[in-house]
Image: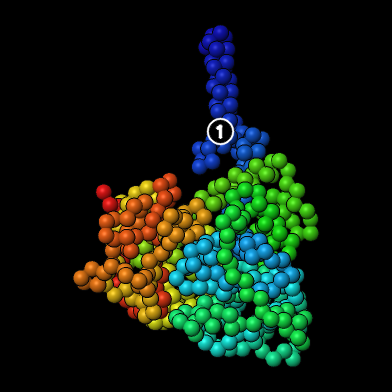
Amino acid sequence: MKPKALIALVAGCLLFVAITTSAQANKVQETYLGTLEYQDQTITKKTAELLHRQILLQRATQLVTWAMPMMNFEQLYPAMLSNQKMSEDDVFFSLCDGYDGVYPYMTANVTTPYTIAMSDLSKTGPVVLDLPAGEIYGVVNNAWMQPIKEINGKPGKLLLVGPGQQVSKDFKGEIVQSDTFLVLYFYRALGTGKEAAELRTAVQVYKLSDAANPPKTNFVKYEPKPGDKIELNTQPRDMRFWEQVNDYVQREPMADRDRFFYAWLKDLGIEKGKPFKPTADQKEILQQGLDVGMAMSQAISFNKTRNMFPTALYGKNSGFEDAMAGMNPKIDLENYSMFNERASYGFEATTTSAGMVSRTPGEGSAYLGSYYDSDGNALMGGNNYKLHIEPNPPAANFWSVTVYDIENRLIIRNETKRSDRSSRTEGLIKNTDGSVDLYFGPKAPAGKEVNWIQTNNGQSFFVYLRLYGPEQAYFDQSFPMNKIEKIK
C-alpha cells in the first residue's frame, strides 16, 4: 500500500473512532420527564439539576395527597372558631343545620342536624364528654379523621386525652387516648320530633380542670347573617396550605408511619422545632406541587378505578361510586396503612366512623357519589339533568340526594336555598311504580319543581345519594342505580 493511501486510511479510521466515541459520550434517553442526557453512563450536570428539581416537585405533589385528611381538619378547626366567634381555649358545641348552617363544611348533610365540636387538647387540656342515653350516633376522630371512639347511643362519660397528658386513673368513665391533640367529636340525633330535638343539646362537655364544678355546656347555633365573613372547610390552594401543614408538624407528635414524609417536608423547609421560612425557589416548588397535588386528589376522589379501589364502583356501569372508596376508617391495617382511600375521602368529605362502613343491613349509613353524566362528561351547572331512582331504595330509615359544588365540595348555593331532596321531602312526586325522577339544572321542568335542585351556570357539581340504614340490596348491589342523564 502506498504511503499516501495508508495515511488516508489511518486518518479515516481515527475520524470514525472519534465520531463513534463522541456519539457514545453524548447519549440521550427519552423519559416521561423529557430528555435525559448522559456522557457515557454519567448524567450531565444539566440533567442532574433537572432531576433534583423533579424530585422535590414529585415529593411536594405526593405530600399533598398524604396530607389531605389532616388538612381537612386543619382547615375545619379555624373555620369553626372564626364562624362561631370562639377561641382555642373555649370548649363548646356548634349546632349546625339547614341550608346556611351546614354550608361551610364539606359534603355536609342538610337533612340531619349536627351537634359538633373540635378541641385542641394542647390548649384546653383533657376534655370530659358526658353522653346521654338515646338515639344519637357519631364519633370522636383524631386529626387524621381516624375514629378513636364511636358514639352509638350508649350513655356514659368519656375523657378525651391528648398525647403525653397525665390524668388520674380514678376517673369514673372511659378514658379515650388520642394520638393527636386536635380531636373532633360530633353526633346526630337520627330520630324526629321533640325527642330528637332535646337530644341535640343533651350532651355535656367541659374541661377536666373544671370537673369539680362543671360549667353549663355552651351550645352555639350557627346562623350566619348577611355580610358575615364565612370561613370554609375546604383545603386552601395557596401557601396557606403549607403553612397549615407546618402548624400540624409543630403541634403534633410524629406518627411512626410518617417518618419518610417528614424527611420530604424537611427538604421543602418544614421541620419540627424550626420556623417555616421557605426560599423563593421552595415557594415555587411548593405551589407547583400543590397545584398538581390537588388535581391528583380530585382524580383519585372523583375518578375511582377498579385497579386503585377494587370495591368502590357500584355495579357494573352505574355511574355511582362509594364515596368512602372502600376505606376502613382505622386506616392502619395489619400489613399497610391505607393511602389512596384516605386521600380520596379526605379531598371531598369530613369525618369517618365505623357506622359509615357498616356491613350490617339496616344499620349505619352508605354514601354513593356521581361526578359525571351518562356520556362521561362533567355535570355542568348550565345544563339540565335527570336522575331516575328506582322503586324502594334500600334504606331502612330514609334516603337523600344532595348536590355539591366541585370547587369547594360544599352544598350548592342557589336562589331557591335548597340543595337536597329526600324521601322525607314533603310533596315529593313519585311515578306510578314508586320510582322517583330528580332534576338538576338552572331551571325547573314544568310541574316538577318539588323534585328539582337548582344548579348554576359555570359551576360544575356532583351528587351524593345517602342511604340511612342501608339494606341487603345495597350490599349485594342488586338495587339498580342509574346514570345521571343530560336532558337534550
**Residue 202 relative to residue 418: left or right:** right
Q: Please state the horizontal and vertical placement of residue 480, each as a whole percent of the image.
A: 28, 68
| Residue denoted by label 1 | 27
Q: Please state the horizontal and vertical placement of residue 151, each as a whole percent of the image.
A: 56, 81
- The image shows a total of numbered marks equal to 1
Q: Nearer the viewer, residue 172 or 275?
A: 172
| Residue at 61% in and 82% down | 203
**Residue 236 in view:** yes
On screen, residue 282 above or below 360? above
Element type where label 1 sits in the image: strand
Q: Please state the horizontal and vertical placement of residue 70, each as a whole percent of the image.
A: 61, 63
**Residue 387 relative to residue 58: left or right:** left
The quadrant where residue 198 appears: bottom right
**Residue 380 in view:** no
| Residue at 36% in and 63% down | 320
Q: Nearer the viewer, residue 231 or 310?
A: 231
Residue at the far left: name it: 432
| Residue at 69% in and 53% down | 243
